[in-house]
Amino acid sequence: MNSTDSYERLRQYTELEYILLGDLRELLQAPDKTDTSLWMLSTLDALLETMPIEFELKQSGGYLQEVVDEHPNWQPLVSRLEREHYDLCIRLSELRETVARAAPFISLAEQIDADLRDWMNQLAAHNRHEIRLIQTAVNLEVGVGD
């Protein structure tokens, strides 16, 4: 697969993740939680399928390799982001199992909502850190002088 195909697949998976997160937000805001658990499980399953593929595409050629090539001393930051991604996937899987076991769902809906919102905030922070690191690496001019 060439780099254009990889980029296109990554873009598609990133868009799918964004849509699924929007669906999850809508489910969390639903006033009636009675029928929410099945939709939530479907959405979480789709996220659990999408996120690893998206990350695998990001790793082709090395995760944030362009950043490390430009700034080798940033390897610990890149490694931390890589670990965070795995931790987010593990946590999402745990939350999915909590939703699946919640019977009746309505009794645990408030706690599940809080946990999923917290997870989504962590994912958003992770994505912001990843983007900020890439932007900083691209924009940083080392050794510029008069």
Image (cartoon, rainbow, N blue to C red):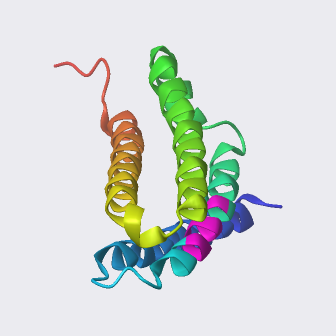
Residue situated in front as seen by the camera: 79 or 118: 118
Q: In which image quadrant can residue 10 be found?
A: bottom right
Residue situated in front as seen by the camera: 89 or 113: 113
Q: Quadrant of the N terminus?
A: bottom right
Q: Quadrant of the C terminus?
A: top left
Identify whether 74 is placed above or below 28: above
Left or right, 72 with reference to 28 = right
Q: Residue at x 59, y 39 (%)?
A: 86
Residue 106: % across, % down? 40, 72
Magenta region includes residue 42 = yes
Residue situated in front as seen by the camera: 3 or 60: 60
Q: Is residue 8 visible?
A: yes
Identify whether 59 is placed above or below 21: above
| Residue reaching furthest to the left | 146
Residue 84: % across, % down? 50, 35
Q: Residue at x 70, y 57 (%)?
A: 53
Identify whether 58 is placed above or below 7: above
Q: Main secondary structure of the magenta part?
A: helix
Identify whether 37 is placed above or below 125: below
For the image, the number of numbered tags is 0
Q: Is residue 21 visible?
A: no
Residue 88: % across, % down? 51, 44
Q: Residue at x 73, y 67 (%)?
A: 5
Magenta region includes residue 127 = no
Give the magenta part as a residue range: 41-48
Q: In which image quadrant can residue 60 be found?
A: top right
| Residue reaching furthest to the right | 1
